[in-house]
Amino acid sequence: MSDISKSINKVDNHEKISGKAKYVSDLFFAGQLYAYSIRSTIAKGIIKAKKVPMLPEGYQIVDYRDVPGNNYVKMIFDDQVVFPETNVTYIGEPIMLLIGPDKEEILALVKQIEIVYEAEEPLFAWTQSAIHYHFDKGEGNLPFARAKKIISYEYETGYQEQAYIEPQGMSGYLDEDKVTLYGSIQCPYYVKNALINCLGVSPNKIRVIQATVGGAFGGKEEFPSLIACQLAVAILKIQKPIKMIYEREEDIISTTKRHPAKIAIKAAIDKEGKISAIQAHVGINGGANIGLSGVVLSRAMIAATGAYTIDNLDIEGDVYLTNTVPNGAFRGFGAPQMLFAIEMFLEHIAKDLGVDPLTYRMQYLAKQNDLTSTSGTFRDPIVMPEMIKKAIEVSSFKEKAKLYQNNNLFRGIGMSFFLHGCGFTGSGEQNHIKAVVRLKKDEFDVVHILIAAVDMGQGVRTTMRKLVAKVLGIGIEQVTYNLPDTDFVPDSGPTVASRTMMIVGGLVARCAKKLKDNWQKSREQICEEVYKQPEYVKWNEDKMQGDAYPAYSWGVNVVEVEVDNDTFVVTPKHIWSVYDLGKAIDERVVLGQADGGIAQGIAYGYLEVMEIETGKIRQKNLTDYIIPTASDMPPMETYIFDNPYALGPYGAKGVGELTLVGGAPAIAKAIEMAIKHKVTKIPATPEYIMELINHGKN
Amino acid sequence: MVRQVMPTSLEEALELLENENFLLFAGGTDLMVQNRSWSETPVAFKKPVMYLGMLSELDYIRKEEDFLAIGAMTSLETILEHPDTPEIMKTIISEMASPGIRNLATLAGNIGNASPAGDSLVGLYLLDSMLVLKNHQGERLIRIHDFILGPRRTALKGNELISEIRIPHVDFSKTVFHKIGPRKADAISKLSFCGAYKLDQGIITDIRITFGAVYLTVVRDKELEQKMLCKTKPELLSMLDELAGDYDKLIQPIDDQRSSRVYRKQVALNLLKKFIREI
Amino acid sequence: MAKIDFRLNGTDISVDCDLSERLLDFLRTKAGNTGVKEGCGEGECGACAVLMEGRIINSCMMPMANVIHKNIVTIEGFAKTERFKILEKAFSETGGVQCGFCTPGMIIASESLLNSNPHPNDDEIKIGLSGNLCRCTGYNMIIDAVKLASKLGEGLW
């Protein structure tokens, strides 16, 4: 019996390599119209008038007056309107659509449209808290009173733009009275539920179909629901097919980004030099509305102690609302911000105490049965010590660190330890998602996987089929998994939170096993499984106490850099990664995710700059928003440790986000070693590095 | 929709230019971005356009006795691959944009665009390049530093076009080019530095220094270069602070979405000092 | 409007277009070549890459005016060649495809590179791919694919 991890040729390689795969902008519907979004040019204000010229036949405005149901986008927190009625809250907010058959004509008409605003004073400072959370562990902050020393730092993380190469978009039509939308989306049912809410129609009047998705990274998790609602309202009003594909600049200025964060951490150090308590405040900039910022804050706070066990914690957090683009999901979802802070903090504490950081950090590494930050338990075996040993060995970390620290070579090497909680926080799976999966075997004995999980490049179209084929002991060609269509698949939940293989795959595997045990040749059979939270997961949502996640994946990243001492330009020289993700369902798929994740992770740490000035994004196209090119990538090596999770299919845990979250602290530490100054802010650009060095000289 | 013409010969192009002002479209890689419109709509030019793509007579590189003659319609990639192209220009071009852009873009276009961040310009200024400007009446020769007047402003008259770039043959002991961009490829420069010298028995007989993207135009000061002539390396090293102070006055960068004034200035001067230290 | 005569994927065609229509739009909306993608519309991402006289160009930067008498090959046309089969095999084997949106452009970039340099080293491959952005793979598996294709396709380039 061959190991499931053994790689196979991905099922969608041919269609993607040959250009045959259809993404949403490749779909053309007869008689289709185009939608142009007219957007706010001010950060805060009241719409006093919309001056629209006489529109020729076939051209129409669609705005809040056309929303038949509720004028908000159903999400976790329902504070985003489909179309604003009177108030605009950020530059780029879509106010209305101009729909018509000819794009040049639309552009000519748009030039004649004027929105008259009464501008109000926008808020950019982080002062208005919309969500406040807090939790304690152990004695909370009591140890501070008896601390020998208190060490405190403030860390800052910047925006990050997902920069999927395929911009956002949807296209759809009315099929009799059924609104049918194709989209570049991660969550067909998020979209469907949002449409039910804003159109005020019954579920069977809506169909959402995933087109091939050209990258998402969380950017297409909740944002597409806004596009869908606007588009569906237009389609229902005009009764014609309409295509709405965002331009790149439009996408950058108006879609959700990673929340910038300011994290203040303090540690109480006892007389043995040990951390007796940590107190932290996590502030994140939610932008103009909350959306799912509360969940991002939650995950960030839960990651307060990263891969370490600290017995006493007092963790607070706030989501601030500002008149800037609303922020949202991005691979890591709050963890990258916090992990940067805690990883740098432990390093800085060690340096301030005059102790070797690696040795210092190792003593706090979480062990099996330790209490988590929220006083749950790390139930499963943790193999971090072995992983760290491997990372040290393959990177020659100790020798290099010694060499680089003791010389002025402007080279550095940094190592980050991290974890990622797999699946939705707390009881999200059980209380909100309630995932359902279905397998249908037809009379030709072909097994159809019916789930709503979206392949956005992470390979689930291949790995899910592989999983089912292996459980059933049949060839993969006997298993199908088509792009999710809400008319045919049940709601197995969104493609987020690194849950797809572990949770959905887990259900699919159980279903397959049931089918195998009851297999009837040449007969149609349907098998369904519904998610049941494992007994042992106990979570108190209000107090943020208990098991935040059913399982954890673990990682170590080592990054070596060279910093030019005339230009302060950082060159990554080599990256080594070690991961425990339970079990790889396909090794090459996992290694590909690892490469892509760390590229995004380190770029978050040193390369990607997005600044907002008086509500306007300065880097609004791919020329100015810098992501790595092939020339920027150093050699990368990844090692996978098997550590099967009992409730994951073949032992699999979450992968998708783990490979991004540790990159920034690893490169920041490497830069710190190279320049011999503490890095407390990312991205650690050459400009920032120069400032640190100049400042240090004074 | 603006008027668009596509002359099939240089003569036809010059005749058209006599009567009307046109946006001169060579490779067009800057113009397509500057005039971009919504996807699936034509480019939104604001002024009549003359496409020069059919002027194959301007696609050439010829080694003349005193200079390399590059026709206006020669692509950057062609220039990069030509054996007679000076090393410093090859280095510069190889770091410009990307292969896909270099196969379309022209040197003439990069010059005509006159961007303060135009990479080819630091090399062309250093090499004392000349341009041949043609109109219906004839042609004139102009030095590059007289041609570029400021950001996006040139001395090109309404009825003229650049027909040829002339790069004089010069021998150097060493040439250096540093492009400081936000990433290793496919980037607009934050700043750039170009330096060349000839060392003859320990004496500097020729030294040229240019900076890009740190002022309205390329920075080159021949008087300062004169100051460095006939000196030995140790003498130059002793003048380092003074030279840095002199160039400091000429380097006046800005803050923008790519970088800061402070960074650009400090790094430009660091590169100057590095260049001299490494003679 | 003007008559543009050029060769598309091996066939000589004559079409009526606006001189300032982008080649990208012509290919996608009139010639049915949706394998050519729009990722940025400003010549930065390379998803729109096609071959012109065997060399990579960004079709979003190309007005139809400049297409006259040129030989254009898109991913659809290139997919019919032996070289494509080698590249497809290589990309599949190394894991160079994830979401696939950058992939046709990467294939075009690979062909353009190998066409002029059949045995590129790592640095040359990186330069050859430097105008094609990928957000999923971190590039290394794509670089490996080009190396592998160069080996597997001995004699083809």
Image: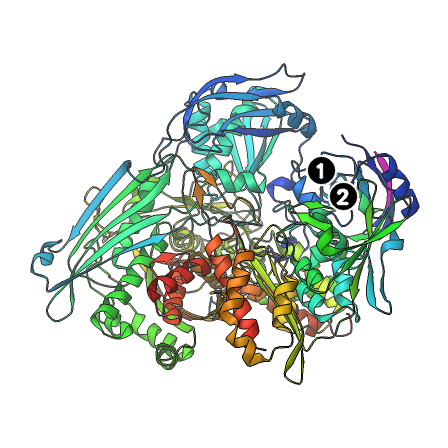
The quadrant of the picture occupied by the C terminus of chain C is bottom right
Residue behind mark 2: C63
Which residue appears farthest toward the bottom when viewing the image? B201
Based on the picture, tell me whether residue C3 belongs to the magenta stretch.
yes
At label 2, counting other C-alpha atoms closer than 10 Å, the crowd grade (few under 14, some 14-19, many 20 or more) is: many
Q: Which chain letter goes with mark 1? A: B
Q: How is the image coloured?
A: rainbow
Coordinates of residue A653 in the picture (x, y in percent): 37, 59
Residue at figure coordinates x 38%, y 50% from the top left: A497
Q: Is residue C117 visible?
A: yes
Q: Amino acid at mark 1?
A: Val
Q: Which chain letter goes with mark 2? A: C
Residue behind mark 1: B43
Coordinates of residue A296 in the picture (x, y in percent): 34, 46
Question: What secondary structure predominates along the stretch shown in magenta?
Answer: strand
Image marks 1 and 2: residues in contact by CB distance under 8 Å: yes
Coordinates of residue A311 in the picture (x, y in percent): 16, 60
Apparent side of residue B180 relative to residue C82 in the rendered image (left or right) = left
Q: Which residues are magenta?
A: C1-5
Apparent side of residue B194 relative to residue A460 in the rendered image (left or right) = right
| Secondary structure type for disc 1 | loop
